[in-house]
Amino acid sequence: MDHSTSLTQHIHASPDKVWAVISDIPGSAATLSSIEAVQMLSDGPYGEGTRWKETRRMMGRAETVEMWVNQADPPRTTTVKANQGGADYTTRFSLAERDGGTDLTVTFGADVVNPTALSKIYMAVFGKLGMSITRKALAKDLAEIAAKAESL
């Protein structure tokens, strides 16, 4: 991953409860305050190939992105992918049982596809700022996932 960041949060809930929250795509707008809407594009339970459109508000702006499950190994790990604006995005959730709860680690990365000279300059100038904003958003998502899982 060209630009990536990783955060871990301990959640006082079992891996099964945490998995239930992160794999509940239709309910994610009720769990995560930054998600405004979810439109499912595939039927069936959460698993490889599950697709949806997610409208998320970041930096005061709402954007809709099509996402899909690239890999799922319940309740241990899952990888979600998206392509938007010339970049490939990867979000990986890893769950590890610890001290009667679960350590949930989220790793987010962005790879620019066929970067131009201008996009390389842009990423050099704004890449760190963008990842800082992303880290704050991921930390908020982890806290909201924890709150939901701990309430189950």
Image: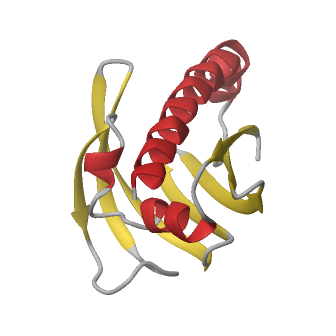
Above or below: residue 80 compared with residue 144: below
Count of all numbered marks drawn on residues in the image? 0
- Quick one: quadrant of the C terminus? bottom left
Above or below: residue 56 compared with residue 134: below
User: How far across and how far down the image is residue 70, in percent?
Assistant: 57, 72
Q: Residue furthest front?
A: 100
Please name the residue shown 33% across and 47% down the image: 31
User: How far across and how far down the image is residue 145, in percent?
Assistant: 47, 47
The quarter of the displayed image where residue 24 is located: bottom left
Query: Closer to the camera, 126 or 139?
Result: 139
Is residue 141 something one can see in this rendering? Answer: yes
Above or below: residue 39 compared with residue 36: below
Please name the residue shown 49% across and 56% down the image: 82
Is residue 111 something one can see in this rendering? Answer: no
The quarter of the displayed image where residue 16 is located: bottom right
The quarter of the displayed image where residue 112 is located: top right
Please name the residue shown 64% across and 26% down the image: 131
